[in-house]
């Protein structure tokens, strides 16, 4: 009789007998090799695994995100949420309670939209004449008309949209996603912000790693000149730079060991090494001369409108970056509206919104179309949003103020159901009244589409577990495929 193992003797479930040969051992333990390899992969890429448990909760629909951020606040009633009642009551006086909107209260007048709405595509979604290019993409868009925010101020609204928090020092959405999923390309940063050198809305806190390791913070790249400063090594063959980095790394390793493997030092070492590896790839990825003339024309690159051309470059570079495996790319629009935000038209609404739309409409529509033509839209989630909307009423005759109680955003690709409008504001566009969606709901949905559970993606800091959605958030299943 064969001697039983200790596991068999004590009645442990799933116990196996001692293998009689190497072949038996391999047959009985083979399934464990996959788990061993997966654990090594998680360790290598720094996947978020609170208490050792993976945060992957579903089959991911998307692999990456492109966030087209319209800072300042696009008017929802002038873009994707038509309100005939505003036209009917245009110019009539309305009193707004300060408790409803402290930044736009008192005696006001309803302001009808100066733009016409028409229905487009098979879905028949109405779009204003501000966005003739995006109007041709409506069958790929899930338009959410019932967004609400918590803050009517730009700085707080921007921070809340990016981090899910009103307090500075919290990780940005892109940082959380890279913490949860890791990088698809070890030679590129996982989180890139594309800007035109003039506009970083409400400061770098919106793109911070917060309390997450420093390797998850955003890398900023500009359209004018070199995308990233000092990306080309001073010495042609790079040997001097490599020697300097090796010396610096040795000193940092020694310091880290003396401090007990300090995370900040380890992150600094990783960032130095990533910057070194980026030198061989970033110039190539950002080089638009490799694109065809028809592609450049699609994005509006090279047109006389310099802001439109630069923004088109940002959108095209966003496509090239996600092609190379960058997890999260944020595209910032040209700042022609002043320090408070591009779309922040308290006055001169018609002039300002038309100029902003002319700068951004073609580039974003081209991005959606280009991703679709290349078979990338299904696995790339495109998000278009500002920090809030704008009031349906005005203190003057041609301007709208901050409005977080009801606004519109849209998503495309990455597992989102295209050609639909979800939620609604009331007849004047004052408040979200149907299928209300919060910023936490939006974040929960983005994470879900990437295969992450927003309740399990946590990081322990200051004695408690933090998450992007705090203690809130639900997945908006109704807009998913």
Image (spheres, rainbow, N blue to C red):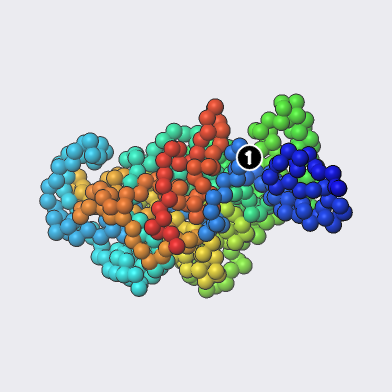
User: Where is residue 382 drawn, in percent x and y?
Assistant: 47, 58
| Residue on which the image places disc 1 | 52
User: Where is residue 220 drawn, in percent x and y?
Assistant: 56, 47
Task: Say which element carries label 1.
Answer: helix
Can residue 352 be seen at all in this image of the molecule?
no
Q: Nearer the viewer, residue 338 or 357?
A: 357
- Residue furthest to the front in view is 1
Q: Is residue 114 above or below residue 462?
A: below
Q: Nearer the viewer, residue 98 or 244?
A: 98
Q: Residue at x 58, y 68 (%)?
A: 291
User: Where is residue 356 drawn, in percent x and y?
Assistant: 37, 56
Characterize the local packing of mark 1: few (<14), some (14-19) or many (20 or more) Cα atoms within 10 angstroms. few
Q: Nearer the viewer, residue 153 or 24?
A: 24
Q: Is residue 370 above or below residue 179?
A: below
Q: Residue at x 38, y 50 (%)?
A: 386
Q: How many marks?
A: 1
User: Where is residue 195 drawn, in percent x and y?
Assistant: 50, 51
Can residue 20 be seen at all in this image of the molecule?
yes
Q: Residue at x 39, y 68 (%)?
A: 139
The quarter of the picture where residue 84 lies is: bottom left
Q: Residue at x 66, y 46 (%)?
A: 42
Q: Is residue 448 above or below residue 313?
A: above
Q: Nearer the viewer, residue 60 or 98?
A: 60
Pick the quarter of the image with the C terminus: bottom left
- Residue furthest to the left in view is 92
């Amino acid at each position: 009789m064969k001697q039983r193992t200790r596991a068999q003797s004590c009645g442990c479930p799933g116990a196996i007998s001692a293998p009689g040969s190497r072949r038996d051992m391999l047959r009985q333990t083979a399934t464990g090799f996959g788990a061993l390899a997966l654990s090594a992969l998680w360790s290598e890429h720094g996947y978020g695994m609170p208490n050792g448990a993976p945060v992957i909760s579903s089959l991911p629909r998307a692999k990456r995100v492109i966030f087209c951020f319209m800072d300042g606040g696009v008017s929802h009633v002038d873009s994707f949420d038509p309100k005939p009642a505003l036209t009917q009551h245009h110019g009539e006086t309305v009193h707004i309670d300060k408790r409803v909107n402290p930044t736009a209260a008192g005696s006001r007048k309803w302001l009808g939209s100066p733009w016409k709405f028409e229905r487009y595509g098979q879905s028949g979604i109405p779009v204003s004449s501000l966005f003739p290019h995006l109007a041709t993409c409506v069958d790929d868009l899930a338009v959410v008309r019932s967004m609400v925010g918590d803050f009517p101020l730009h700085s707080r609204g921007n921070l809340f949209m990016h981090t899910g928090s009103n307090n500075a020092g919290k990780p940005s959405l892109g940082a959380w996603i890279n913490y949860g999923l890791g990088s698809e390309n070890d030679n590129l940063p996982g989180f890139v912000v594309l800007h035109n050198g003039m506009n970083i809305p409400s400061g770098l806190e919106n793109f911070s790693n917060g309390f997450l390791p420093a390797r998850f913070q955003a890398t900023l790249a500009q359209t004018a000149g070199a995308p990233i400063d000092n990306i080309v090594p001073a010495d042609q063959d790079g040997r001097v730079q490599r020697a300097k980095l090796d010396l610096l790394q040795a000193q940092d390793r020694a310091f880290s060991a003396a401090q007990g493997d300090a995370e900040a030092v380890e992150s600094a070492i990783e960032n130095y090494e990533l910057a070194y590896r980026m030198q061989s790839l970033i110039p190539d990825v950002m080089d638009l001369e490799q694109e065809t003339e028809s592609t450049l024309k699609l994005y509006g690159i090279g047109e006389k409108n310099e802001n439109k051309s630069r923004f088109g470059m940002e959108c095209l570079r966003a496509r090239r970056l996600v092609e190379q495996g960058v997890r999260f790319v944020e595209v910032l629009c040209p700042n022609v509206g002043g320090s408070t935000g591009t779309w922040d038209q308290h006055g001169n609404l018609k002039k300002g919104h038309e100029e902003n739309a002319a700068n951004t409409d073609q580039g974003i529509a081209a991005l959606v179309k280009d991703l679709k033509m290349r078979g990338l839209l299904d696995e790339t989630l495109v998000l278009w949003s500002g920090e809030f909307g704008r009031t349906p009423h005005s203190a003057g005759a041609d301007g709208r103020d901050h409005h977080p109680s009801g606004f519109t955003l849209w998503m495309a690709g990455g597992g989102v159901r295209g050609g639909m409008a979800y939620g609604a504001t009331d007849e004047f566009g004052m408040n979200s009244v149907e299928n209300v969606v919060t910023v936490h709901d939006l974040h929960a949905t983005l994470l879900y589409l990437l295969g992450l559970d927003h309740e399990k993606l946590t990081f322990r800091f200051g004695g408690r577990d933090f998450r992007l959605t705090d203690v809130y958030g639900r997945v908006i299943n109704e807009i998913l495929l």
